[in-house]
Structure formats: structure tokens, C-alpha cells
Amino acid sequence: MPRGGSAGFFRGRYKSEPEDFVVEEVPAYLPCGSGDHVWLWVEKRGLTTMDLLGELAQRLDRDERSFGIAGLKDAQAISRQWVSIEHTDPRACEALQGDRFAVLQVSRHGNKLRMGHLRGNRFVVTLRGTQPEDLEKARTNLAELVRLGVPNYFGEQRFGKRGANLQKGLDVLRGNARAFAAKMPRRVFGLVLSAVQSEVFNRVVIARRQALDTLLPGDLAFLHRNGAVFAVTDPDQEKERLLAVEVSPSGPMPGPEMMLPEGEPLALEQAAMAALEITTDAFAKLPFRLGRGERRPLRVPVADASVEGVPAGVRLTFALPSGAYATSVLRELLEDTIWFGGD
């Protein structure tokens, strides 16, 4: 599917106000009601997830590192997510609130929340500045994304302001990684490396975006229901699952532990690395166990999608699996992805 879909692009802006971008976590499981870990269902507005943990830590007199989360949520938005903390009084959590957050529900569970413990996220996005005819364009094109899947680009927030994380990561991989690691906090070191992996992946998506519903000989396919990756021996055998967006071609998050495809898919991935003047070997020489590598689907399914007209413009509702970005959907619909604020 070409960008803009069969109905063509339209203009709209989002994140003008936090209410224009609402994201709600879809958890992998819910707290069972008993256990040593207190789980908080929190709504925040115009606040990063890390700043939210800072607010909670101050009020509960705990270290920020003692909290568990399943994922990071946008700052310039209204978002709802679970946060866990061990050995605390649930009653002390029930009334917690600040100018930009509020605890909506408190429960218990037997374990701490870990990054990735979520099925996905549900989004409600209001697009302002649209024209009356754009409502039907949005309906047509969003329906096509549900049928075909959406290119699984990493969003702008992955790369830092003005791409600063990406440039730092490239400097690390092209230079003396251990020297950089000695000057950089481990979390920041991990962020800049992931920015490079994300750039390689996005370049492969661009190279293959006209045929993301097609497997090539030598591909490593991604099974969406459980994240399994398998070598493709006969692409024709997977046509039915490809059409149903149950299986998709995968792309590289480069590192020494990443599986490598063969043939044309491998050549495309090597070209993306070469354009950035880096090699997989550079990731193998890193200190710590960072940048180990994995496969990521080149497209993802879009679910629970709907479009409605509202006084401000057009409102989109859709759900994406864990790790996918709402901006991937918006860039397929909007002529100019006008983004106010930031992460």
C-alpha cells in the first residue's frame, strides 16, 4: 500500500493539547489481588513516565528504582498505565495525586512489573485542522491499515531531540566503546545504542515498504501471536497467514545474538548497516550485555480501529501491539505529521 492509502493523504495536527493524544496500556495480565507487590493504575498528563516515578517516589519515600513499569508512555499526552512497588501500604497509595497525575486504582500481585509485560497500547488521537472530506479519507485509509498492517517504524522519540541519541550511538560504535561507556551512565549508553539499532531497522522498513506483506526467499518470518521467528523455506506456503497479518517479514535490531537471514533480505540489511558505516562486529565488542540484537516485525497489525467526526476535527481510535508507535499509523494518513510538544 502506498503512503497515504487509496484515498490519499490529508492534513491534520495532533498533540496540540494533551487531550488530543490518549494512550492506555493493555496489560499482559491484571493483578490478582494478593501478594507483596502493590500495583497502581495511574493516569498522568503532560508528564514523562520517569518523572511520574519521581513523583511517586517522593510521596512514598522510596527509591525510583524500586518501582516496576511495563513500558514508557508519551509525555505530551494523557496516559494510563500500571506501576508496581513492593512492601508498601496500599492505603497510602489510594489517595496519591499531584497536579499532573492521579492514582485511579490500587491492587496487589505476586510479582514486580517488568518492561515488556504488556500486550500493547490503545490510542485515541484527535486530529485538528482537518477538512470535512477528510473524515471519509481517514475511514478508508485506516481500514486499509487494519487489512494490511502498518509499517513498524520506530517513532521520533527513539532518537532523542534532533537525533542526538542516534549520533552519540554512531560515535560509540565507530570509536572506542569502552571509553564512551566510562563517561556515560549505563542507561544512557543503552539508549544511544538502541537508537542506532532503530535507525538500521527503519532503513530496512523503507527499503521493503512496498512489499511488507510479502516474504522473500531467505527471510526470517515473525509470528505475531507469540513473537517466534522462523526461517522461510517456501514463501508461497505462508501466503494465507501473510494476508491475515498473522506472519510478517522481520527486520534487524543488529547485535551479536541476532539471527541472520539469507539472500536478498541479508543484502538489504547489510546495505543499511554499511550506509551508517557500522558493522555487526561493533556490537559484539560492547561492554555490558547491551545491544545484543533481535528480530522485529517490519509491519504490525492494527486492531479495534474506528474513526469519528468531532468538533475539533477527526478522532481516531486504534490498538497496536507492544513496541509499536502510534506515529507509524499517523504517518500513513497525514500529509504533514505536525507534532506539537515532544517526549
Image (cartoon, grey):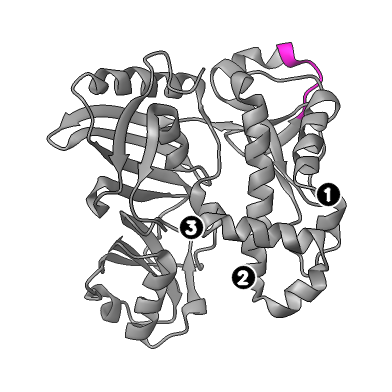
Q: Is residue 311 left or right of residue 83?
A: left
Query: Could you say whether the residue bearing mark 2 is in a helix, strand or loop?
Result: helix
- Identify the magenta region: 231-236
Disc 2 or 1, which lies upstream in sequence? 2
Rendering coords of residue 312 (x, y %): 16, 38
Is residue 117 visible in the rendered structure shown here? no
| Residue 62, picture quadrant | bottom left
| Residue 215, picture quadrant | top right
Query: Could you say whether the residue bearing mark 1 is in a helix, strand or loop?
Result: helix
Up/down of 153 relative to 182, above or below = above
Rendering coords of residue 184 (x, y %): 67, 75
Question: What residue did someone put label 2 on?
Answer: 187
Disc 2 or 3, which lies upstream in sequence? 3
How crowded is the residue under tag 3: few (<14 C-alpha within 10 Å), some, or many (20+)? Answer: many
Q: Disc 1 and disc 3: Cα gap in Å?
A: 27 Å
Looking at the rendered image, the disc whose residue lies closer to the viewer, 2 or 3, is: 2
Disc 1 or 3, which lies upstream in sequence? 3
Residue situated in front as seen by the camera: 341 or 260: 341
Q: Residue 28 shows which numbered tag?
A: none
* Residue type pointed to by label 3: Gly
Up/down of 48 relative to 298, above or below = below
Badges 2 and 3: C-beta atoms under 8 Å apart?
no
Question: What residue did someone put label 1 on?
Answer: 280
Question: What residue did someone put label 3 on?
Answer: 71
Rendering coords of residue 288 (x, y %): 77, 69
Is 76 magenta? The answer is no
Question: Which image quadrant: the C terminus?
Answer: bottom left
